[in-house]
């Protein structure tokens, strides 16, 4: 006999108002005895699981199963619930019969098989020859043992500066040797923090200026607090000298997450910096008196451009260029069009690509396509007046880091399309863009490792930085 029991899940929205999500499993769902097990399970899944796990089981395609993906482990998860008193994953044992749960387990297991876009079992081989539509390509290891290679900058002589999040700065030379550059900032290498991006001044050949973004820290009331800062240095041989503070984001916070931190110069010589929300989504991104959750724009010495959008707004941080961002770790200013592209990590689901425009609000946390990591919903809005829609979004989250447009003819068929690194699924994502839309996406270099950065060098080659073990690869096209 099937009992009809209703469950109520408490869902908190950001405004603090409690909404309730109610559902009841009634006879009518299952009355047709002729329904197949698959139909029955699909109905349960759609009604009771899809809101948190994705309509196509996106969250189960993740290889990092916390409680195991054997049939018995999945049964346990559904029957008893997971996540303890947080009630993250509700216990369905009170509502579903064991036979229903067993059917659901089969349904999920076969669903994972079918939806297996990300085959983590497949071994990665750096010597493999890959096929694109119009050319073949392979990988060349440019340097290894780079820790967590976060930023890279191409020096005029062909050397590459690479920052390791733990604090080291490497000069990678053409022959693959690397030396350490001394004299950089003292960084707070905890959590997601440390030494982050590196960018050369557009006039580097004349002035030798290198910009570094990093997690700065200090003590406040006996506690270590940290933030995102940028310093400028003059590179002399393998030493950084003449340090100057360019931006320091206030207030400091006690978390070790969401530093953002991509640095980029545009054609006119303005310096852009992204700063993440530092984990304080309700206080930072929408408040113009605070630095976090923003894209900032300054002159090369840190002074404020007089046409920044909030220079005349009382109390506002004058370097703010756009706001309502969560944690932007990909930033690219198109050298031809000047369009500013950024992407940001969403919460669970809802990573976004945005086109950044002066003074605009990108909505975090008031609008989002994602949900909280614990499965609760903080906003049901994906659009709101006055807030910019994302150009593109990913559910499930791919964990984007680094991005570049491919420009020129070195990779036929890729020209004009966007490459984004995936930390979570360990591949390079090629977004084919046409008519201002992502028309299709291709998974490249499956299982290469957590892709932290991707850039196109002045030599036209694409460089891909992967973490742990930190390796810098170059994509080498071979004619078909
Ligand atoms: C309110 C949101 C929510 C709903 C509804 C929900 N889940 Fe979950 N589920 C979660 C969360 C959050 C976790 C992770 C808990 C943790 O990490 O401790 C989870 C974990 C799981 C896991 C274990 C995954 C692992 O990594 O080992 C399984 C299996 C699962 N859910 C199945 C289901 C099924 C089947 C349904 C529908 C009958 C369902 N869930 C409904 C939020 C939900």
Image (cartoon, rainbow, N blue to C red):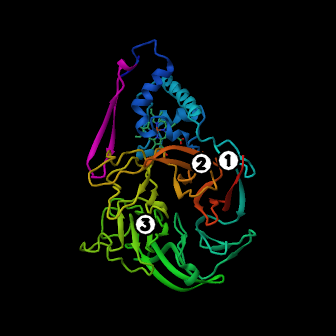
Which quarter of the rendering shows the N terminus? top left
Q: Is residue 403 left or right of residue 372?
A: right
The reply to whether the magenta stretch includes residue 5 is yes
Mark 1 element type: loop
| Residue 52: % across, % down | 42, 40
Q: CA distance from mark 1 to mark 3?
A: 38 Å
Task: Of the two numbered discs 1 and 3 on the same chain, state the one appearing first in sequence.
Answer: 1
Task: Of the two numbered discs 3 and 2 on the same chain, state the one appearing first in sequence.
Answer: 3
Of all residues shown, which one is farthest toward the left?
314
Q: CA distance from mark 2 to mark 1?
A: 9 Å
| Residue 292: % across, % down | 38, 67
Please tell me whether residue 237 is drawn above or below residue 117 in the rendered image.
below
| Residue 177: % across, % down | 74, 71
Mark 2 element type: loop
Question: Do the numbered discs 1 and 3 sit on residues whose CB atoms are within 8 Å?
Answer: no
The answer to which of 156 and 329 lies nearer the viewer is: 156
The answer to which of 383 and 175 lies nearer the viewer is: 175
Q: Which residue is mark 2?
A: 413
Q: Which residue is mark 3?
A: 275
Q: Is residue 349 visible?
A: no
- Kindly report which numbered mark, 3 or 2, lies closer to the viewer in this rendering: 2
Residue depicted at x 49% and y 17%: 36
Stretch in magenta:
4-29
Residue density around tag 3, few if under 14, some if 14–19, many if 20 or more, within 10 Å: many
* Residue 316 falls in image quadrant: bottom left
- Kindly report which numbered mark, 1 or 3, lies closer to the viewer in this rendering: 1
Q: Which residue is mark 1?
A: 135
Mark 3 element type: strand
Question: Do the numbered discs 3 and 2 sit on residues whose CB atoms are within 8 Å?
Answer: no
Please tell me whether residue 142 is drawn above or below residue 182 in the rendered image.
above
Q: Total marks drawn?
A: 3
Residue depicted at x 43% and y 63%: 276
């Amino acid at each position: 006999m099937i009992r009809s029991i209703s469950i109520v899940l408490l869902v908190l929205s950001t405004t603090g108002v409690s909404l309730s999500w109610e559902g009841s499993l009634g006879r009518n769902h299952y009355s047709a005895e002729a329904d197949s097990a698959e139909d029955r399970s699909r109905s349960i899944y759609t009604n009771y699981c899809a809101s948190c796990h994705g309509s196509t089981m996106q969250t189960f395609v993740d290889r990092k199963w916390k409680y195991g993906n054997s049939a018995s482990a999945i049964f346990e998860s559904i029957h008893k619930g997971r996540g303890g008193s947080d009630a993250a994953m509700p216990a369905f044992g009170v509502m579903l019969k064991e036979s229903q749960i067993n059917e659901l387990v089969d349904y999920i297991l076969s669903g994972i098989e079918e939806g297996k876009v990300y085959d983590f079992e497949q071994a990665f081989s750096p010597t493999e020859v890959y096929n694109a539509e119009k050319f073949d390509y392979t990988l060349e290891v440019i340097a290894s043992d780079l820790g967590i290679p976060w930023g890279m900058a191409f020096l005029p002589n062909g050397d590459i500066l690479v920052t390791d999040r733990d604090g080291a700065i490497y000069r990678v030379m053409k022959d693959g040797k690397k030396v350490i550059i001394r004299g950089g900032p003292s960084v707070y290498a905890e959590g997601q923090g440390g030494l982050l991006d590196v960018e050369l001044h557009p006039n580097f050949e004349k002035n030798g200026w290198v910009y570094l973004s990093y997690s700065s820290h200090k003590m406040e009331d006996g506690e270590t607090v940290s933030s995102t800062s940028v310093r400028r240095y003059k590179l002399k041989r393998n030493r950084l000298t003449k340090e100057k503070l360019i931006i320091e984001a206030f207030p400091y916070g006690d978390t070790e997450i969401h530093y953002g931190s991509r640095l980029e110069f545009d054609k006119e010589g303005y310096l852009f910096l992204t700063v993440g929300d530092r984990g304080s989504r309700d206080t930072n991104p929408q408040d113009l008196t605070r630095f976090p959750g923003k894209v900032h724009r300054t002159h090369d010495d840190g002074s404020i451009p007089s046409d920044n959008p909030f220079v005349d707004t009382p109390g506002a941080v004058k370097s703010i260029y756009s706001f309502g961002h969560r944690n932007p770790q990909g930033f690219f200013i198109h050298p031809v069009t000047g369009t500013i592209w950024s992407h940001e990590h969403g919460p669970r689901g809802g990573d976004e690509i945005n086109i950044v425009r002066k003074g605009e609000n990108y909505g975090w946390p008031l609008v989002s396509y994602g949900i909280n990591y614990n499965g609760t919903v903080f906003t049901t809005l994906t659009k709101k007046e006055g807030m910019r829609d994302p150009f593109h979004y990913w559910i499930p989250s791919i964990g984007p880091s680094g991005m570049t447009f491919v420009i020129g003819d070195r990779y036929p068929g890729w020209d004009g399309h966007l490459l984004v690194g995936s930390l979570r699924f360990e591949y390079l994502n090629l977004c084919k863009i046409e008519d201002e839309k992502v028309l299709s996406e291709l998974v490249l270099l499956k299982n290469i490792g957590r892709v932290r950065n991707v850039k196109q060098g002045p030599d036209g080659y694409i460089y891909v930085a992967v973490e742990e073990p930190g390796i810098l690869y170059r994509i080498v096209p071979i004619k078909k």
